[in-house]
Each structure stands twice: as C-alpha cells, then as structure tokens.
Amino acid sequence: MRRGAVFIAHAATLVGVLSLGFVHATYIGHYPFTGTFRFGWLLGYAVLLSGAAYAVGIPDVPRTARGAALASAAAVAAAALGMSALQILYGSLLLPRYVVAGAALLVVPVYTLAAGLSRGGWRREEERDRVVVAAGPQEIAAMRRDMTTVPERPCVIAAVIEPGGSLAKAAEVSQANVVVLDRAAMADPQMVDQAAVLHGRGLRIRTLTLFYEEWLGKLPVSELERVSMMFDIGELHRARYARVRRVLDLIVAILAIVPLTALVPLVYFGNLIANRGPLFYRQGRVGRGGGTFIIYKFRTMRPASDSTTWAGTNDPRITSFGGILRRTHLDELPQIVNMLRGDLSLIGPRPEQPGYVEELREKVPFYDLRHLVRPGLTGWAQVKYGYSGDEQGAIEKLQYDLYYLRHQGPGIDLRTLGRTLRSVARG
C-alpha cells in the first residue's frame, strides 16, 4: 500500500501536468503539444512538484491528515514559486500560468490522499509484523525508544519476556510472527529449543542484532562481538566501487564550486552585520586511517568560542547569522574543498575532533571501525539520528555508522543522499 501511494502521487503529478499542458496547447494556445520547448518544461515542472513532495516527506512519512494537507500545500507552493522564479530569471513564459497554478491546485488533494493511503499502509504493516522479544529490561527499553523514531520497517512489539521465560506461550498469546532473542536468550538452551519449534511453525527468528539491522537500520553496540565486525566494507573490499565513489565526489565538488563562489560575498556581508569575525572556521578532524586533516566551514560561533566542548543545538556561542547558516546547512558548503583534496567523501561517517575521538575510543567498543573509510559530508547516521551534542549521542550515531559500513554500496548511498536533500529542504 505504501509503495502504491508513492506511485499514485508521482504518476498523478505527471499525468496532471501533461494533461493541463495538452489542454492549453490544443484548445487555448493552439500550438503543437510536443513540438515546442514547453513540453520539456512540462516534464521539468512535474519533476519539481514530485521533488518538493519528497522533500517534505509526502507521501511516505507518516503524519496526520491535517499535517499531510499542510505539507502538501507547502510542497506545491514551493514548486510553483520555484517555477515562477525560473520564468522571471529566463525572462520568458516557459509555462502558462494556467498550467503552473492548475497543476498546483490539482495535486494538493492527490498528495493528501496518497499520504493517507501511506499512513494506513504503515499501520497495517505494523500489525503484520508482531514481535515477541526475549531480552533484558535495558534492551527492551532501548528497543521501545528506538521504535518511536521512524524505523526502516514498521512493526509492533506484541510481547516481551525475560530470558528463561516461556517463549512459546508468549508467542501464542500475542499472535506474534517474529521472535527476537538477545545474547542472553541465545545462550539459554531451553529458549533456543523453543525458538526452533516456533521456527518450524513458520515464525521468523532473529537475533537482537539482526532485528536492529532489518527493522531499525542500525547495529546495537551492546550486542556486537569483535568477530561480528569482520564484514566486507565496500570502500575497502570492492575496488571498482571505491573508484566510482571518488570520481563522483570530484564531479559533485567541481559543480559545487559555483554556488560556493556565489555564496561567499553574501556570507561576508552577513558577517559584517551579525557575525563579525573571520569568514571561515578551520578545525582538526580525524579522517580515514585515523589521520587528521583540517576541515573548512563558514564560521557560525563567536571568534573567541572554546572549540573543545560539545556544541549543542541551541548553543549560546552561536551567533544570530551563524544560526541561519546552521539551519540551512550552508555553513557546510566550504567542505567541498576537503572533497577536492580527498579528505572527505560525499557520503560517509561524519569526522569528529581528535580530542573527542580519543575519549570515545576508550569508552566505546569498535569506535575505530568508522575510520576505515573516508568520512563524509553527510552520512547515514546524520539522516537517521541527526545532530549529537554529547557522548551518548556519539554512541547512538556509531550504531548507524556501523550499519552503513556493513551495507556500504550504491543503494544505501542513494538513500542517504535522498534523505539528506529532504532534511535540507525541511530545514
């Protein structure tokens, strides 16, 4: 149902825009429908509408009916204004107002309906995967907390038991179809025997690690052992993938030089008004292989700020103009210089300061694994967890970084890039 909702939203956008374009060409403007430059702009406008919908999470991010309607209206308004701005920039009527406004009005109810279908599909999928968990209280609490965020797959925790309890009875009473065992439960022969019986009846059996990986998109540090970390990593074990990544990094960085050059004067004048001090901020970070490099950003804090402490989301050291740069992520744009130099990739674990790395190495198992690959301008941990301003946040993000390392490849890179664009668009 959720995939069908996505198809309906994008197909309706394309059909709606082309239909209105056909009506205008045939009955109003009297010009060939596919024989002019306007046909290409019709396709472009359809892509712009779909892109704006994706940016606000329509239709796949669950939300209320009112929230879906407001998000749909905001997406469509942004796309229509963007198209209008392009027409002003080109000094030409690329598309008739009838098509721009008509398509905008047409797709709002379609997007709202698609969001409702997706929300209903999400709820049905939650009930489809009913999970009984055999784990300790801490693991159960962590799992419930993680399920409150948007998981990779929906499910509902139908029953919980501590290791040593009756797994078969809990599964029968709760009508579960997925069984999850933590490390202690896996070490209990009786629990494993019960799981084997349930497996023979058609229930899916997962370790806690595999459940986190499939349903939540992370690897729980508490459940991992050293041997379990010896998996293939795309950047290390697939030479072609590594070469293609580097070429794409260079292409993106070269293309990004244009907006960076245009942005420098604007940031400079913004600094004169509300952020007096140096234009750029330089800081040491730990990169691939544990080596350090200097990362470049537009400065967002007062020049005398202490850079050796964790920075919070509402840190008082952030200036008013710096806050704007952070919310829009424009402060990160100078890092294209690091991409050109090979310090950063487009996708990868975010690099941390050397002082933090030394602390976390001592406290967090497997922390150095994230340094096996080139760090990224954005990453799976950024789009799944967001900003971390303390040690606990760094531990949470590491679990997403480990998941990324295990699955590193074009698929998860594209998912990360798409969700990054959504995050930037939503501010």
Image (cartoon, helix red, strand yellow):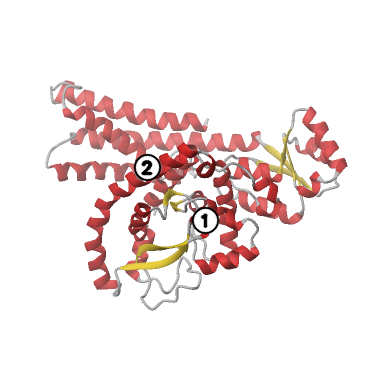
Q: How many marks?
A: 2
Image location of residue 162, percent across then percent down = 81, 50
Q: CA distance from mark 1 to mark 2?
A: 20 Å
Q: Which labelled disc corresponds to residue 247?
A: 2
Q: Would you call the spot at circle 1 few (<14 residues within 10 Å), some (14-19), or many (20 or more)?
A: few
Name the residue located 55 percent from the left edge and 41 percent from the top edge: 407
Looking at the image, can residue 372 be seen?
A: yes
* Extreme-bottom residue of the structure: 304
Query: Considering only vertical position in the picture, is 402 above or below 302?
Result: above
**Quarter of image, res 100:** top left
Label 2 element class: helix
Are the two marked residues, 1 and 2, in contact with CB atoms closer than 8 angstroms?
no
Image location of residue 51, percent across then percent down = 35, 39
Q: Which image quadrant: the C terminus?
A: bottom left
Image location of residue 124, percent across then percent down = 60, 34
Compare residues 106 and 380 and report the one nearer the observer: 380
Which residue does the numbered mark 1 point to in the structure image?
A: 289
